[in-house]
Amino acid sequence: MPLLKTTPEGNDLLTTYITTSIVPSSEAFKQGNDEEGVRRFANGVLGEGSYEKLPPPVQKRLMDNVQELKGERLSRDLFPPTTCEDVQKVKAPTLLIDGELSPKMFHLINDMLERCLPSVERAKIPAASHQMEVENPQAFNETVLAFIARH
């Protein structure tokens, strides 16, 4: 996320994400409304109205992990400074995966990471948003397993 601050487009996307997802979900958590916090977070990441469309087992899984999400959202340093030089220190082969339907912000983050990582491959999962392992598990698994087999 901090890499988004390095371009005007990225900064605009990050600002929108903060105001439409981070702040509302954080406020809900502060008020003790965990379900609303999760809903606001999911809609900010997956698109408005997405949480309501998630199958009940997926909503339950998100709620089962609410303490982690709450800890992240209430952290004072949610997005620690990260530079391209920091990312270049990752020497392991890295797979960047885009969901075809993911919000633009995530594609832009992967664009930036792709330029910084020394050993990188990139894949796109069709018909999937940010939760691609749920929305298109077959394509996701095939992509990841093929990457692992090559490395």
Image: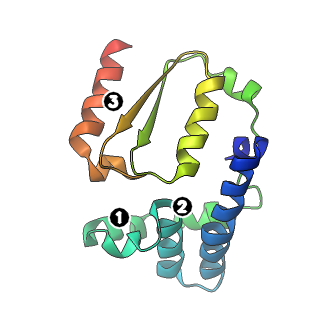
**What kind of residue is marked 3?**
Val
Where 150 sits versus 87, above or below? above
The Cα atoms of the two marked residues, 3 and 1, are separated by: 22 Å
Mark found first going from the N terminus, 3 or 1: 1
Q: Which residue is mark 3?
A: 144
The Cα atoms of the two marked residues, 1 and 2, are separated by: 12 Å
Where 29 sits versus 83, above or below? below
Q: Which residue is mark 2?
A: 68
- The local crowd at label 3, few if under 14, some if 14 to 19, many if 20 or more residues have their Cα within 10 Å, is some
Q: Nearer the viewer, mark 3 or mark 1?
A: 3
**What kind of residue is marked 1?**
Arg
Percent of width and height locating residue 28 = 60, 81
Checking the image for residue 151, the label placed there is none
- Residue 14, quarter of picture: bottom right
Q: Are marks 3 and 2 in contact (CB under 8 Å)?
A: no
Mark found first going from the N terminus, 3 or 2: 2
Residues 26 and 17: in front is 17
Q: Which residue is mark 1?
A: 61
- Residue 146, quarter of picture: top left
Horizontal arrangement in the rendering, residue 76 relative to residue 52 (left or right): right
Which residue is depicted at the point 58% across and 27% down?
114
